[in-house]
Image: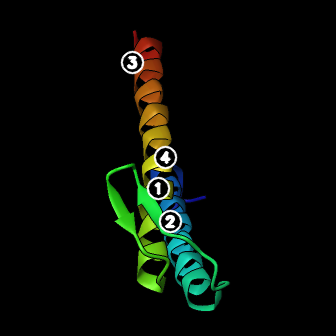
Amino acid sequence: MSGQFGGRWFVVALYGVIVAITGVVGAVLGAVGPESLTSVELLGLVELQPTPLGLAIYGVVTVGLILGVLLGLVAYVSRRFDAEQAE
């Protein structure tokens, strides 16, 4: 791949696509899901109703946070590894 579309930019773009898909799936689930859906708690702090917006927010925040932390850890290890290789 060329430098423009490879490496870190690809990973960040893939992260954004995955988070966006999660939001769309949450909205669809809230719109057409069963009537028996109960409210969900976002990080144990905010209670969200099972509406399309509520489930989209829940999906985007939870998946975005989990993948964001993992992506941050990979970036940190990558930078440390690159720095050790340069020495």
Residue matched to label 4? 66
Mark 3 → mark 2, Cα distance in angstroms: 35 Å
Pointer 1 with pointer 4, Cβ within 8 A: yes
Mark drawn on residue 62: 1
Residue 45 location in percent, x, y? Answer: 32, 52
Q: Residues within 10 Å of mark 4 (few under 14, many from 20)?
A: few
Q: Amino acid at mark 2?
A: Gly
Pointer 3 with pointer 2, Cβ within 8 A: no
Residue matched to label 2? 59
Does residue 22 appear anywhere in the picture? yes
* Mark with earlier residue (1, 3): 1
Q: Residue furthest bottom?
A: 32
Label 1 residue SS: helix
Mark drawn on residue 6: none
Q: Residue furthest right?
A: 34
Does residue 16 appear anywhere in the picture? no
Q: Residues within 10 Å of mark 1 (few under 14, many from 20)?
A: some
Pick whichever, 21 or 45, lies toward us.
45
Q: Amino acid at mark 3?
A: Ala
Residue matched to label 3? 83
Closer to the camera: disc 3 or disc 2? 2
* Mark with earlier residue (2, 4): 2
Residue 77 location in percent, x, y? Answer: 46, 25
Residue 73 location in percent, x, y? Answer: 45, 32
Q: Amino acid at mark 1?
A: Thr
Pointer 1 with pointer 3, Cβ within 8 A: no
Pointer 2 with pointer 4, Cβ within 8 A: no
Pointer 2 with pointer 1, Cβ within 8 A: yes
What's the residue at 43%, 12% (across, down)? 84
What's the residue at 49%, 46% (across, down)? 66
